[in-house]
Image (tube, rainbow, N blue to C red):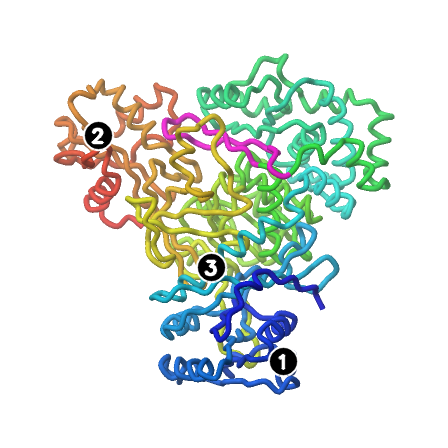
Amino acid sequence: MAELIVYGKENIIQPAFYMPNRISIEAGKAMHKLLNGKVCYLVDPTYPPAPEIMDFLKRKDVEIEYFDFRNTTSRAVREQILAKFAQGTSVVFLPGQVAKHRGTYSDVPSPFLRHVGSLHISPVPLYLGYFGDSVRNLYREVYEEGCHEELCILPQLAPGPQTGERLMKAWLETGAARFADQPILKTSLTTQLVKGIKAHPNTEIIDGMTGNTLPFFKALGVSMTVAKLLRKRDDKRIGVILPPGPGGVIATLSCLLAGITPVLINYASSRSAFESTVRQAGLKTFITARKFMQKLDTFPWPPEDQLILVEDLLKNLSKPALIANVLLAKAGPASVICKMFNTDARKDTDEAVMLFTSGSSGEPKGVTLTHRMILANTSQCACRLELDGMRFLASLPIFHSFGMTVAMMLPLLTGCPLCAYPNPTDARTINELIQKYQLTLVVATPTFARAYLRRADKETYKSVRYFVLGAEKLQPDLEREFLTKCDVKLLEGYGLTETAPVISANMPDVPLIPGSKFFVPGTVARSVGALLPGIAIRITDVDDDTKELPLTERGMVWFKGANVFSGYVGKPELNHDLFWNGWFKTGDIGQMDLNGFLTLGGRLSRFSKIGGEMVPHEGVELAISEGLELNAEDGVKIAITGVSDAQKGEALVLLSALPQHQRSSEEKEILTNLRTMLADKEMPTLWAPKYLVPVESIPVLPTGKLDLRGCKLLAEEALGDLS
């Protein structure tokens, strides 16, 4: 049996109604003892607890009250509980065995939470979590060495409505707090990478371009050799301009071993965005490859004396030193390697990796991902996936947090093979690699997936267990076509660079457990999935950050957890508006259901996600205003908003109150001229509005700021439902 640690014993009261998110034999024994045996257990025979729990209760000859959820009214159950209270006896609801995906935070299906809410008896929440000592088993519901259970007894909820929602909130926030306190998150990502690689030395990185393979131990040995050279430099951060693959792994791991922060550069960005990234990160050295430079001949490459070329670096490495390090990586203890490179010198909240995301004016914003954040999110992902036999496709760029965390760090930490290919738009080759190497986890954007579908058949994805899409809204037609043509269920997820990045994901449904008619779904249509363990959510009124709403009501979405960042680099004023008591304000509008699934209802922030890229509305407005020589003194005459788009996720709409934009017959010409004007300003093509909507005036709030909701409604009314 797993060890059980109990917190919150001071919250035990008699008599009371205790409501756990799940139950185990050890947790059941602990509660029985804490309540001095003066306890009755509430059981629905159609939703029975595990046999060993029922056997324990019968051996103890304890009281069990049965009720059939579907045929017993809330009032009748309430009277059952109150009768026990009158005798001085507490009541513990026993969740049954339920079909569920891995990493589910609660074994109580939503119908039961609604039923509990209608009892109008304030419960004492009990939170039972599972924790381990490695990324792979940090949240495993498996009794194995290094794992333990934690039972948290929380303060009794206040009387009032929506008890189910408040129970869910208490469970989520407790789970996030306990998850954040796990010892592994205080350690070093670099140390854990060395341990992960050493535990699976022969696992391979497959180069999808050449078919060559690189065992983990060789990647570590080369990285150790390169790291010794990098340590001689005075760089605190080094830019990495490489695609996913062996080179990207070695460059990133070398920096980490050298105690240098790798800054993963967006090589698809404009000159101004790249120059801003270099300035904000203080970069003076960059690692790249000559072959990659030749393919990106339009990228604003730094001067040659600032470049470290992978080909030249590897060619000039000392052969004896390289051989010695590869042998040490294969046969030496992880502790020796970690001591050699002092990998614990930077850990926990120290910066590990730096990425850049778009800013409201088009300038990138620096996001520091700490050791804690990356370890937390890889652990959260690992607990949701069946990792045995997993083979990853790594084709998303490593400058995207999903490509870095999920497709690079997670396989290295957990010993899963990965097949890397630098071009996620090459549908033919991607499909061939999936089939050839029997890959089981594919991550893409809906735009990429639509291209893959055109070149796929029922055989292409037979090996795939998880086909996860993010960055854009998953369109229903794409989901239907994939299921019909390829027999593949697309799984929509959600994440942010600022959360390292994964917040939630739909998962495949699991078969029902014999004898139980209830389940927690793996997928909920039109949702972005259930929150990963260790993440708490807060919903507020969109116009008042201090007005908290029930989790099931639509509002502004906030997150808290060990994977959530602490603020943008060098942006104190922006950070002030984004954080409240440790909660991060996402700018997304959404709500949860009582199974913990998050549904997003659009963004009130000034961005649109188009083809997976963040496009700043304010940047487009500024460029158009300058190009049209608009005078700010004349008031707000144009605004950019976003609407749903079947192909790209979202499309930009230009709302215009300008007289020259009122004739529909000239719309095509006006939009063409705007595209040309933006191109002349070296703006990305994604920044060009797709639609023009003439309006009487631009909606403005009393404060003088744009009425973002009003702008969006005007666009949707004019264009109709484009989804």
Q: Secondary structure at mark 2?
A: strand
Q: Position of residue 375 (x, y in %)?
A: 62, 44
Query: Mark 2 — residue?
Result: 638
Query: Mark 3 — residue?
Result: 170
Q: Which residues are magenta?
A: 348-369
Is 663 or 498 nearer to us in this picture?
498
Q: Position of residue 278 (x, y in %)?
A: 52, 20
Q: Position of residue 472 (x, y in %)?
A: 42, 45
**Marks 3, 2: nearer the viewer:** 3
**Please, what is the three-letter code of the amino acid marked with disc 3?**
Ala
**Marks 1, 3: nearer the viewer:** 3
Say which quadrant the N terminus sits in: bottom right
Residue drawn where x is 62% and y is 19% of the image: 285
Earlier in the chain: of badge 1 and badge 3, it is: 1
On screen, 126 above or below 286?
below
Q: Position of residue 29 (x, y in %)?
A: 64, 74
